[in-house]
Image (cartoon, rainbow, N blue to C red):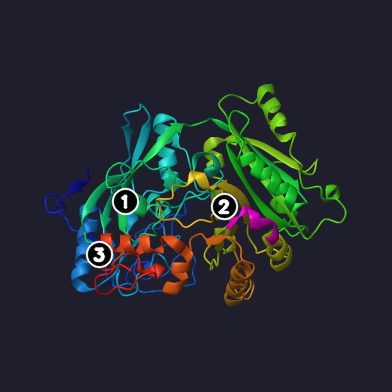
Amino acid sequence: MIAYLDPQQNQTPNPPSVAGDGTGTGTGTSNGTETEPSITTASSDFGGIIHAVPAAVIHPKSITDVASAIRLAGTRHLSVAARGNGHSISGQSLSDGGLVLNMRSLDAKVELVSLPDGKYCADVSGGALWEEVLEWCVKNYNMAPLSWTDYLGLTVGGTLSNGGVSGQAFRHGPQVANVVQMEVVTGDGECHVCSAADSSDLFYALLGGFGQFGIITRAHIPLQPAPRMVRWIRVVYDKFEEYTADAERLVTRTGPDAFDYVEGFAFVNSSDPVNGWPSVPFPSGPSFDAGLIPVGSGPVLYCLEVVVHYNHQRNDKVDEKVDDMLRPLNYIRGLEFIVDVSYVDFLSRVKHVEKEARANGSWESAHPWLNLFIASSDILDFDRHVFKHILKHGIGGPMLVYPMLRRKWDRRMSVALPESEIFYLVALLRFPRPYPEGPRIDEVLAQNHEIVNCCRSNGYDFKLYLPHYETESDWAEHFGDRWSRFVRRKADYDPMAILAPGQKIFSRAAPLRLL
């Protein structure tokens, strides 16, 4: 049965703080997190393409404050957007003329929760960064969540509202499949606690629901013992069909011979320091020997990235296990790169990329990223049309491409996926230098549109991940036969369409009616 928290009975003596005059810098800190965002900061996001000025920025300290802000918006005909660390890419965390809730200001305490089956969860704030969750869990209990994103400077509530994928998803599922319970405020200002057993429709609506149905204020994240070390391996392919065959074989393997992490990326077959061969080796290891690339290889090569966890010092058993796991793979012999690092350092690996991007100015520039899920049946054709043609010169950043399994995603969630059991994440993570040193943003956006149009015209089974559409018909096409369920959930949990206006799915208007 649903557990209700009555905001009137839990009123805090101090109201949430409000930034309404545009003062303050709202700048980011050196560790990648924002200070309390000002009106100016809350008018844009990491994407840097869409801008919308809110009426005020609210800094809630509790679920009560979040509920009060939503109720206020309801009486003033305002919309409300939850902002975590500001890493949306298409204005999803913006609220033009409405309220922006700074979720980082919520109570940051973390508690260990024991489950009836003897396992444990971390009870964390929806505004907590995943890097903070990792640090607390490992430091205090030598435990960690099972599923991650590549970049840990994202909030728990943010990734649960979208998906949350990385190289562990094939084993443990995405982050939306790794949450036990959530505390949430729905669009009517009511506070709820929901799980798969209690208020399950709300629970699954929230997971990948783009913040349309409620604002997640706390979550219970399941934990497992944290390994001490990882063997981190990259191997190179010149043939995409061999790369995908090996990658799909690895993500469907189970038992002790399965890797703990499988990802990969495409890169340009050239000496370009950003897009080419130098992007593959680890900094402390050997360089890329281009002489090993077979004659006649195409304009794009592929790197499969895998990891094995272990808890002891490097020894012959680890070496033997890794050798056995790599032996069947059809990569180019001699183009393998291996390093041993701590588990925490591996999960924090993108932090180094962030530091470099901040130093060269590309972190603060626009980020016209494009993320897609593409069925395995279409991925070879996608490679021919997109990687080998449209993107053959690279994008000034990673071009991720790796498989995951649909059975790891619950169909009751709001996330829209291809129908194929095996599908690929394709993430085009551009870090362009500001124009004129880098390309014009409108040209990059046009290239993104060309790629999406290529998928449509060729009839691929695909979905945009972290989508942004302008029309209801596009959203209806995105959700397909689940669109009516999405609309019904909006009518149930946010009938005035107060929440998440930046997604441009519903307009703030009269109560929604079912289709």
Q: Is residue 220 left or right of residue 327?
A: left
Q: Which residue is mark 3?
A: 18
Q: Amino acid at mark 1?
A: Asp
Q: Is residue 260 left or right of residue 27?
A: right
* Badge 2 or badge 3: first in the primary sequence: 3
The answer to which of 378 and 46 lies nearer the viewer is 378
Q: Which residue is mark 2?
A: 420
Disc 2 and disc 1: Cα gap in Å? 24 Å
Q: Amino acid at mark 2?
A: Ser
Residue beneath the point at 39% across and 60% down? 210
Does dot 3 land on a helix, a strand or a loop? Answer: strand
Image-quadrant location for residue 22: bottom left
Disc 2 and disc 3: Cα gap in Å? 46 Å
Q: Amino acid at mark 3?
A: Val
Residue 444 appearing in the image: yes
The answer to whether 338 is drawn above or below residue 203 in the figure is above
Q: Which residue is mark 1?
A: 201
Does dot 2 land on a helix, a strand or a loop? Answer: loop
Horizontal and vertical percent position of residue 29: 44, 56
Residue beneath the point at 40% across and 55% down? 161
The outermost residue toward the left is 9
